[in-house]
Amino acid sequence: MQDGTYSIAATAESGASILVLRIEDGSIRGNDTSGTRYRGTIAPGPTGGFRVSLEATFPTGTFGIWGTSPGDTFQTRRFEAEVPEGFFADRVPYKLPGYDMTLTAVRIPDENGFLADEDGLDRYIDILDDVRKAWAAHQE
């Protein structure tokens, strides 16, 4: 497993989301496009892959592709899974057992790692706001 920043496309029956995760010295942190924050660990798994333990905190009013429904309070769920050895390198879709979800990971430049930080969601919203303004100016 190589430390770095990864974009992970997650698709499930309930929808899709893009996660940006930063992996460093066995720890994971990140955010996704639904506003969910991820914290966790990664370690070698018993069958040659990687054992991933994640805590996902879903904000109010959003749904999660992990099977959560929109709520009036923040929800935190814990997930554990083993992913194959090449998951973070091969760009091959992987059907996550037990979750009816398909994940595809892509290594992205580490300078985009800020999207996985505590303020990553705010910075992403700022970028989208600038894009919205650019489109509005373009359409005038």
Image (cartoon, rainbow, N blue to C red):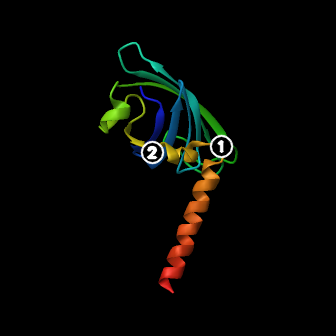
Q: Residue at x 51, y 32 (%)?
A: 23
Find disc 1 in the rendering and name its residue. Answer: 118
Report x, y in % for residue 30. 56, 40
Could you say which disc has been placed on residue 135 in the image? Answer: none
Please state the horizontal and vertical placement of residue 126, each as a whole percent of the image: 61, 61
Residue under the point 42% across and 33% down: 99
* Residue visible at 57% across and 61% down in the picture: 127
The residue at 51%/87% (across/down) is 140
| Mark 2 surroundings: few (<14), some (14-19) or many (≥20) residues within 10 A | few
Residue reaching furthest to the right:
73
Where's the N terminus, which quadrant? Answer: top left
Query: At which x and y percent is residue 96?
Result: 38, 32
Side (left or right) of 26 relative to 102: right
Say which label, 2 or 1, has the lower sequence index. 2
Residue 109: mark: 2
Q: Which mark lies nearer to you, 2 or 1? A: 2
Does the image show residue 86? yes
Residue type beneath disc 1: Glu
Residues 33 and 58: in front is: 33
- Determine the CA span between mark 2 and mark 1: 18 Å
Residue 46, percent from left and from top: 40, 12
